[in-house]
Image (spheres, rainbow, N blue to C red):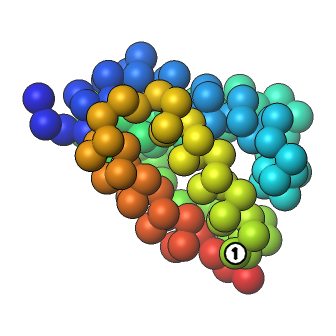
Amino acid sequence: MNKAYDLLGKEPGIRALVDRFYDLMDTRADAVIIRAMHPDDLSDSKDKLFWFLVGRFGGPPMYEERVGHPRLRARHMPFAVDSAAAAAWMACMNQALDEQVADDAVRQAISGFFGQIAEFMKNR
């Protein structure tokens, strides 16, 4: 058991991480900038991030089966993702990781991956 998918608790663990991330985006004052980029109902956003992470971390390719290739940067291009937005996204994700992932090494590795993604998404 060494895939991130397994280390995060497979689908239930990844779902808990995604749900906590979006709960934090709804409640943290510093997340207003990224919350405004999402629809009022976060159900679809939660599902898409969950599907993406399941496949990215070694589980079944749920996102690709339902939506196609992730094309993350292209899909986020309509949104003004600058350093402040990336930092807000990371603040929510790092808090969710701190609360949901007990193993320090796993948490740091996953945070590093998310940090790369946040930087890659910047388009302003």
**Residue reaching furthest to the left:** 1
Residue 106 x, y percent position in the rendering: 29, 42
Residue at image x 69%, y 75%? 83
Tell me where residue 21 sits by quadrant: top right
State whether residue 77 is above or below residue 15: below
Could you say which is closer to the camera, residue 91 or residue 76? Answer: 91
Residue 78 in view (yes/no): no
Residue 114 in view (yes/no): yes
Q: How crowded is mark 1: few (under 14 residues within 10 Å), some or many (20 or more)?
A: some
State whether residue 54 is above or below residue 111: above
**Mark 1 residue type:** Ser
Q: For the residue labelled by badge 1, is the local secondary structure a helix, a strand or a loop?
A: helix
Which quadrant is home to the N terminus? top left
**Residue reaching furthest to the top:** 12
Residue 66 x, y percent position in the rendering: 48, 35
- Quick check: 31 left or right of 61? right
Residue at image x 31%, y 53%? 109
- Quick check: 113 left or right of 97? left
Query: Residue beneath label 1, please?
Result: 83
Residue at image x 72%, y 29%? 23
Which quadrant is home to the C terminus? bottom right
Residue at image x 74%, y 65%? 85
Residue 32 x, y percent position in the rendering: 86, 51
Residue 78 x, y percent position in the rendering: 76, 67
Tell me where residue 34 sits by quadrant: bottom right
